[in-house]
Amino acid sequence: MITKEQILNIAEECLKGSDRFVVDVNVDKNNVIDVFIDADTQVTIENCVELSHFVEEHLNRDVEDYELNVSSAGIDFPLKKLRQYNKYVGKDLLVTLNDGKKKIYRLNSFDEKQLEAMEVVTKKYGKLSKISLGDALTIKFDEIKEVKPYINF
């Protein structure tokens, strides 16, 4: 059976020396493999194709059949690696706390233990709305269930 660790090792070998990195790998019982990558800059389709070919070269279909999907960790994908937060400094994040409450924060900085951010407050004035920022605060990672990028339209 193909393992998550096996795929992770192959993918990390391919991405070594680039600004791309593995965010998550899932391998189900039917050998459906999903690899999610991100980058300090951007992930292109060509990057995904390159990684897909590299993984396929290191697996043997004569030994085990599998389905391989390689994609970027898109805007709806939760941030799972600390490295992902770099490109969101100064941008808005949707933070779900362990108690289920969701709030939008503008990320100021972060470290391995916490986020430094300001709550984004939207006030409605009829059809118009005004966005303002609250005071700076600290949110510890152990208080957070999930963080996703947030785009306000």
Image: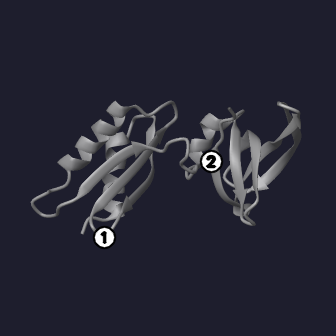
Check the image and report above or below for 35 versus 128. below
x, y percent for residue 111: 69, 48
Residue at coordinates 55% horizontally, 41% vertically from top-left? 75
In this figure, which residue is indicated by the disc labeled 2? Answer: 148
Q: Residues within 10 Å of mark 2 (few under 14, many from 20)?
A: some
- Examine the image and state in which quarter residue 134 appears: top right
Check the image and report above or below for 92 versus 94. above
Q: Earlier in the sequence, mark 1 or mark 2?
A: 1
Judge by depth and name the residue closer to the eye, 64 or 141: 64
Kind of residue sitting beneath label 1: Lys
Rendered-image quadrant of the N terminus: bottom left
In this figure, which residue is indicated by the disc labeled 1? Answer: 29
Residue at coordinates 39% horizontally, 36% vertically from top-left? 17
Judge by depth and name the residue closer to the eye, 133 or 116: 133
- As drawn, is 23 to the left or to the right of 133? left
Q: CA distance from mark 1 to mark 2?
A: 28 Å
Kind of residue sitting beneath label 2: Lys
Mark 1, secondary structure of its residue? loop
Check the image and report above or below for 85 versus 41. below
Mark 2, secondary structure of its residue? strand
Rendered-image quadrant of the C terminus: top right
x, y percent for residue 27: 34, 63
x, y percent for residue 53: 23, 42
Residue farthest toward the left in the current orientation of the protein: 62
